[in-house]
Structures are given as C-alpha cells and as structure tokens.
Image: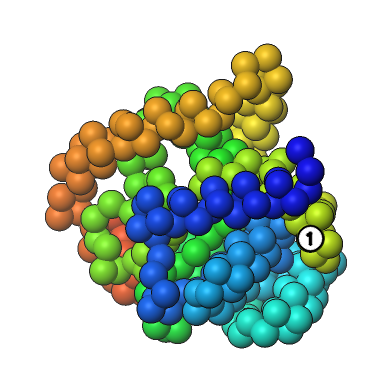
Amino acid sequence: MTDKKFIDDLEKNIKSTIRDYHLLSKTDNIVVACSGGKDSIAVLYLLKKFGYDVSALILDLEIGNWSKKNLDNSYAFCDEHDIKLHRICAKDELGFSIEHLMSCVKAKKAVENCTVCGVIKRWLINKKARELGAGKLVTGHNLDDEAQTVFMNILKGNPLLSAGMGPKSGVGAQDMFVQRVKPLYFCTDAELKRYTVIMGFRILYAKCPLSGTVFRRDIKNCLDNFEKDYPDVKRNIVRKYLEMKPALARAQEDKEKGKIKRCSVCGEPARGDICKACEMIGLV
Ligand code: SF4
Ligand code: ZN
C-alpha cells in the first residue's frame, strides 16, 4: 500500500471512531495526555489537523534521559504545531520522585513499577485535566493496548476489570472523572509506528527503562505471535469485548453501587475510604 493511501485510510479510521462512538465535539475543551511517545504525538497532531480545540498535558516523571528526551520532543512538537503544552512534574506534586515511591511501595507490597506509576499517572492527570477545565481527556491507547488488557483481565480471572474500558472509558462516578476517550482505539501499534515514521515526527521509540510488567509483556508477545498465524486476532478480541461491554458494565455498576466515594485524604474518586494513590503515598 502506498504511503498516501495508508495515511488516508488511517485518518479515515480515526475520524470514524470519533464519529461512531461520539468521542469529541468541536466545542469541547480537549486535553491530550501526552507522553511524547508515538501514540500521543500522533493523536495530538491529528486532532489539531481535524480542527479540534486541543492542548497537551505532559506528566514529567523525571525518569532520567528517557523522560528528558520525551519532554524535549513534546515541547518541540507543540511549538511547531502551535499547541499549548501544560507540564506537571511528579516530584513537585508528590514531594519525592516516582522512583522513590516505587521502591517504598515495592518494599511492602508485591507490585510492579508500572502498577505504581499507572495509579499515580491516572490520579495526577485526572486532577490536572479537571483543573484545566477539560471536557474530554484524550489518551493515545491503541488496539494492541486494548486487546492486551482485555486478554490479561480474562487470564487474571476477572473480566469485570474491563468493564470501564472501550473507546470512551468509565463506569459510574462520571462527574468525578474527566471523560477519557481513545480516538486511536482501532489503530494498531504497527500502523501508528508507520504513520509517525512517514510523518517524520521526532519521537523516541525506546521503551521506558523502568517498564517491567512481565505479565503484560508476555501477553503482548503471545498476541503478536498469534497474530502471525491468525490475522485479526487482536481486532477480534476487541470486537467481541465491545459486544460484551454493556453486560460487563451493568454487572460492574451493580457491584459498585454506592461504593465509589471521595478519598478522605485527597478528595479524588476512591473505592474505599482512601484512594489507591494516597494509599501508596502513605507507604513512603
Ligand atoms: Fe510508568 Fe511503566 Fe509507563 Fe514507565 S512504562 S512510564 S514505569 S507506566
Ligand atoms: Zn486520595
């Protein structure tokens, strides 16, 4: 397929995802959670190109040179494309580095770096996006991410964990969360890599040096291998999941009725008295 046809098809795919799932409107104040990686840069570029009112929000985790390069690339990109970039620094918000938090939590609990980091990222980005008055928070999640998570949750024996996923995430407690949307939902990792290479965006493709989620990595390898022999396996997982999502969401809502409240420490949504982020911070 020529590069031109490939780009046209990918852009059509994203436009129809936005339209079919009512993800965004031209009057929304849209904040894109930007990591500086290929997915967030691609979605930022495309939403701006499609005429949406976008700004970018980067959470600087200060993970050595990797974060520095991603931050530099994000500033350069936003500058070139006239997009406002908001930066929050994890260390300033927490009072200590994310790596320090990871080591304190891991000393007391059997969790992986990405679990700690993921909780803190969601917590800080939700708070900041709300402060910025965001109507929608866009993330760069793609089809591979979604297929991996659905499959992982099944293998963990808890498919209900997927109830709040989908192109528009969230079940219940909607007013406490800025609505998260995923315009790249039906684009594969490989397609997004090809797109960003063709477009010549300055992107660091290297993985985060602290990534160490062994389970997700195994699931990724497993699905990549399946895909070689059974094309469309990832798309099939996601399609089937979307058919089942209404039933999962109902079951989850019943389970959580009255259980989502505000964290007594920070006021963010929590399933218990204290949210997961404050629970982790309390271990430092
Ligand atoms: Fe955080 Fe893991 Fe992502 Fe690195 S790979 S930024 S540790 S969630
Ligand atoms: Zn809290």
213 shown above or below 202? above
Is residue 188 visible to us here?
yes
Residue displayed at 25% across by 61% down: 173
Q: In this view of the protein, which residue sits in the foreground, 215 or 75?
A: 75
The answer to whether mark 1 is within 8 Å of ligand 1 is no
Q: Where's the N terminus, which quadrant?
A: top right
Q: For residue 160, say whether it is visible.
A: no
Residue at 15% in and 55% down: 258
Q: Amino acid at mark 1?
A: Met
Q: Residue 236: x, y in percent?
A: 49, 26
Indicate whether 137 appears above or below 27: above
Q: Nearer the viewer, residue 42 or 11?
A: 11
Density class for disc 1 (Cα within 10 Å; few <14, some 14-19, many ≥20) is few
Left or right for 229, reference 206 = left
* Residue drawn at x 20%, y 46% as measured from the top left: 253
The answer to which image quadrant residue 233 occupies is: top right
Q: Position of residue 70 (x, y in %)?
A: 76, 68
Looking at the figure, which quarter contains the C terminus? bottom right
Question: Picture coordinates of residue 255 (x, y %)?
Answer: 19, 42
Count of marks placed on residues: 1
Render colour scheme:
rainbow
The residue that mark 1 highlights is: 199
The secondary structure type at the circle numbered 1 is: helix
Image coords of residue 158 (percent x, y): 37, 30
Tell me which residue sits at (27%, 63%) in the image.
174
Task: Tell me if residue 72 comes above or below residue 37 in the rendering.
Answer: below
Question: In this rendering, is residue 153 above or below 269?
Answer: above
Asked whether 218 or 1 is in front, the reply is: 1
| Identity of the residue furthest to the top in this view | 229
